[in-house]
Amino acid sequence: MQIHVYDTYVKAKDGGTMHFDVFTEVKDDQKAVEYAKQWLISIGEGDAVISSKECRFCHSQGAPDNVVEAINKDGYFIYKMEGCK
């Protein structure tokens, strides 16, 4: 499966910056922002400001099986990097 990667930075409640990627099957900027919002709500960061300014398309690539499974189930996969819970 070819996936699309959206590089995302948001300000957390504690004032720190959370850096994560949103992986999607469809290259759709608004959908990527929606997925990022869903995930932020699920981790208690629903008040974080997120728009296409904070969540930008980066590149497309192949995906490993665990990412494909998550995308098939939820529509997206979050790859956590700096400052994520």
Image (cartoon, rainbow, N blue to C red):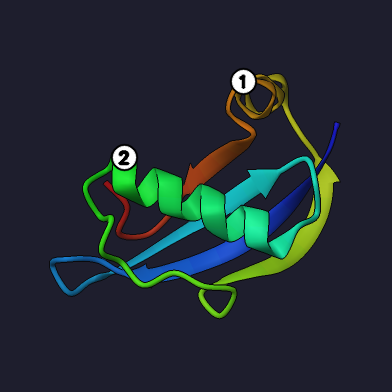
| Foreground residue among 48 and 60 | 48
| Mark linked to residue 73 | 1
Residue 56 image offset from top left, x and y in percent? 64, 71
Please count the marks in the image: 2
Residue at 52% over, 65% down: 8
| Amino acid, disc 1 | Lys
Picture quarter containing residue 70?
top right
Find numbered disc 1 in the image and state the secondary structure of the residue it sits on: helix
Q: Residue at x 69, y 23 (%)?
A: 72
Q: Is residue 23 above or below residue 13?
A: above
Q: Nearer the viewer, residue 80 or 6?
A: 6
The location of residue 3, given as percent across then percent down, is: 79, 43
Residue displayed at 61% across by 20% down: 73
Instruction: State which quarter of the image contains the N terminus.
Output: top right
Q: Nearer the viewer, residue 7 or 75?
A: 75
Q: Earlier in the sequence, mark 2 or mark 1?
A: 2
Residue contact between numbered discs 2 and 1, judged by CB atoms under 8 Å: no
- The answer to whether 35 appears left or right of 12 in the picture is right
- Residue 26's disc is none
Q: Is residue 28 left or right of residue 8?
A: right
Where is residue 28, by image quadrant? bottom right
Across and down, in percent, residue 75 comes to 64, 33
Instruction: Label 2, secondary structure: give it.
Output: helix
User: Where does residue 68 sit, x and y in percent of width and height?
Assistant: 71, 25
Q: Is residue 5 above or below residue 19?
A: above
Horizontal side of residue 18 vs 70, given as left or right = left
- In three-dimensional space, the C-alpha distance between marks 2 and 1, rounded to whole angstroms, equals 16 Å
CA neighbours of label 2 inside 10 A, class few (<14), some (14 to 19), many (20+): few
9 w.r.t. 69: above or below = below
Q: Is residue 61 left or right of residue 33?
A: right
Q: Three-letter amino acid code at disc 2?
A: Ser
Which residue carries the number 2 mark?
42
